[in-house]
């Protein structure tokens, strides 16, 4: 207990010190920014499944059957280099509201399926046809920058953002006739920000819908990195 009180007391003393540090130390505070525009390298088909039943086991069984049917359709089409991912699974009470009153009517099970492949995969149309052939499914298709690509550019973006911050700080110092500056504190975002420049490709499909080739022409997306640097002088 004594040690705990000591830690708390030390932290309480430290707070005014940090505040005073920013007030008494002359600082130049700048934001560094870097950006890289690159073409998306992944195509992501997102399929939302939902099934209602009086028993949880029945609803789950139908979802599993639909998932397996899609997996079989993709395999039968001999599609190259793709991943079928099932996530966001949930089961909730199916609550129905009528005339201001609610009553429970079985359960509703939900699951999201993702078919992820290379954005330039020649089998994109086959994936669409496989989804259509697997049953009455709605889906969205959007293009994205893969996690691997983001990680490969992270160090470059960080270095460019830091150089940008330094350049701004030096310009401020030169303009104000400050002879020298030194780094005081650096903070940065943990992950690059991805900003799409184009609207996402969106589709809806059902089992009896006519198969139409998707318009595949994704625009470049922007990877951004920001850092915040304080310089003393």
Image (cartoon, rainbow, N blue to C red):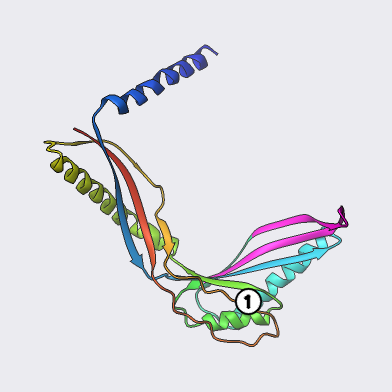
Q: Quadrant of the N terminus?
A: top right
Tell me where residue 52 appears, x and y as whole percent: 80, 64
x 69%, y 67%: residue: 49
| Front-most of residues 171 and 160 | 171
x 68%, y 70%: residue: 67
Tell me where residue 171 appears, x and y as whole percent: 17, 46
- Report the residue that reaches farthest toward the top: 2
For residue 105: magenta?
yes
- Residue 32 higher or lower than 177, as above or below: below
x 23%, y 30%: residue: 26
Left or right: residue 177 versus residue 192 is: left
Q: Which residue is mark 1?
A: 204
Tell me where residue 151 appears, x and y as whole percent: 38, 57
Left or right: residue 185 versus residue 55 is: left
Q: Quadrant of the C terminus?
A: top left
Residue 12, by quadrant, is top left
């Amino acid at each position: 207990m004594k040690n705990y009180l000591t830690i708390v007391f030390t932290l309480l003393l430290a707070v005014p010190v940090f505040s005073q540090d920013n007030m008494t130390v002359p600082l130049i505070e700048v934001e560094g920014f870097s950006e890289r525009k690159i073409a998306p390298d992944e195509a992501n088909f997102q399929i939302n499944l939902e099934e209602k039943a009086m028993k949880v086991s029945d609803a789950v069984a139908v979802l599993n059957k639909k998932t397996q049917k899609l997996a079989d359709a993709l395999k039968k089409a001999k599609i190259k280099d793709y991943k079928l991912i099932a996530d966001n699974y949930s089961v909730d009470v199916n609550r129905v509201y009528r005339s201001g009153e609610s009553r429970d009517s079985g359960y509703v099970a939900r699951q999201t399926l993702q078919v992820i492949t290379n954005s330039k995969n020649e089998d994109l149309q086959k994936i669409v046809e496989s989804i259509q052939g697997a049953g009455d499914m709605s889906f969205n298709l959007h293009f994205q920058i893969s996690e691997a690509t983001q990680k490969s550019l992270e160090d470059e973006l960080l270095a460019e953002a830091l150089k940008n911050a330094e350049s701004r700080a030096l310009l401020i110092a030169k303009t104000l006739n400050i002879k020298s500056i030194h780094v005081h504190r650096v903070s940065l975002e943990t992950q690059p920000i991805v900003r799409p420049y184009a609207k996402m490709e969106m589709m809806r499909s059902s089992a009896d819908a006519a198969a139409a080739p998707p318009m595949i022409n994704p625009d470049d997306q922007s990877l951004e990195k920001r850092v915040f640097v304080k310089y003393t002088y």
